[in-house]
Image (cartoon, helix red, strand yellow):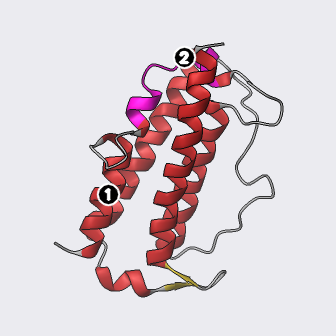
Amino acid sequence: MSESKRISNLYQSIYDGNPWLEVTLTDTLKDITAAQAYRKINPDLNTIWEIVNHLIQWRRNILRRVQGETITTPDHNYFVPVLDPSEVAWYQSIQNLAKSQESWNAFFESFDDKGLEKIYANNNHTYYEHIHGIIQHDVYHLGQIVILKKLVKHS
């Protein structure tokens, strides 16, 4: 099996598979309502919804980088307030997360392992580091979502 296929399998498992950590994005998010996702537990913490939107934007950012684009990350680092707290808007965020996974899956289908050694000019990290970095980023924020979910459901 190619390295990119192994990485793709790892990324997919964190999204909705059977990862070693036994927690996935889809299982964690499936029973969260818009009101719960929007709820601010503490003024110094992001909401579940803000984190989900942040994940989506970073997934897009890194995908565009490994597709050869030079990206400037905005000062807000993709943490922006949710303006429409409706169930429809929450559903759209969940769908956007799914679409970002589909985009990554499509990318890996035609990605050649030789591309893992390419260097992204803005930070001199390899594509390999970027791809593993976005997986680590997802897992980091997944942990935050798990904790916030417990807080919003039990408070």
Q: In which quadrant of the rendered view does residue 65 lie?
A: bottom right
Q: For residue 124, what is the image quadrant?
A: bottom right
- The quarter of the rendered structure image containing the N terminus is bottom left
Helix, strand or loop at label 2? It is: loop
Q: Which residues are magenta?
A: 26-37
Name the quarter where the C terminus is drawn: top right
Using the rendered view, name the quadrant where residue 22 is placed.
top left
Say which mark, if any, is on residue 10.
Answer: 1
Indicate whether residue 146 is drawn in magenta: no
Q: Is residue 106 above or below residue 56?
A: below
| Picture coordinates of residue 6, whole percent (x, y) | 26, 66
Give the side of residue 153 with respect to residue 24, left or right. right
Q: Residues within 10 Å of mark 2 (few under 14, many from 20)?
A: some
Q: Amino acid at mark 1?
A: Leu
Q: Nearer the viewer, residue 76 or 68?
A: 76
According to the image, label 2 marks what residue?
33
**Helix, strand or loop at mark 1:** helix
Is residue 31 shown left or right of residue 141?
left
Look at 27% across and 57% down and name the residue there: 9
Q: Amino acid at mark 2?
A: Thr
